[in-house]
Image (spheres, rainbow, N blue to C red):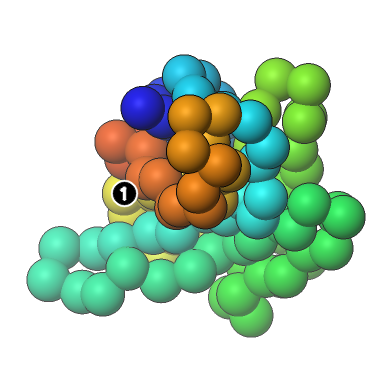
Amino acid sequence: QVQLVESGGGLVQAGGSLRLSCAASGSVFITKAMGWYRQAPGKQRELVAIITSDGTTNFADSVKGRFTISRDNTKNTVYLQMNSLKPEDTDVYYCNIVVITTTTRSVGGYWGQGTQVTVSS
């Protein structure tokens, strides 16, 4: 089994910053792509940022220049640094980590439990 634990969400004023973390544990052999998504009530989950195993990153147009994504492979952890936050960034943020497991050597994507980010105007 693989478990993902997110942390770092909260309430911040517009223009402020937050840093989200997501750590994978359990039967993790190798982590592949790591990403952050967000979802508002009644809407589809959308990609915010992704980082591949070789460090290549990609961002949604709405967050380019404001958000950065990084990873620590020694800790199986992905981070999302969010700066210059706007009220429209308010959502539940979910991490997703693609893992090769120690047990079956299969590849699977796992989701975190979600963390609320609220940006007040």
Q: Quadrant of residue 80?
A: top right
The crowding category of the residue bearing disc 1, from other C-alpha atoms within 10 Å (few below 14, some 14 to 19, many at least 20), is some
Q: Quadrant of residue 59?
A: bottom right
Q: Could you say where residue 11 lies in the image, as x and y percent from the top left?
A: 38, 33
Q: Is residue 19 above or below residue 118?
A: above
**As rendered, which of 105 and 90 lies closer to the eye?**
105
Residue tagged by mark 1? 92
Q: Residue furthest left?
A: 42
Q: Residue at left 46%, top 19%?
A: 26
Q: Could you say where residue 49 lies in the image, as x and y percent from the top left?
A: 62, 62
Q: Residue at left 70%, top 20%?
A: 75
Q: Could you say where residue 55 lies in the image, as x and y percent from the top left?
A: 86, 54
Q: Is residue 48 above or below residue 106?
A: below
Q: Residue at left 29%, top 36%?
A: 113
Q: Is residue 112 above or below residue 119?
A: above
**As rendered, which of 6 and 2 lies closer to the eye?**
2
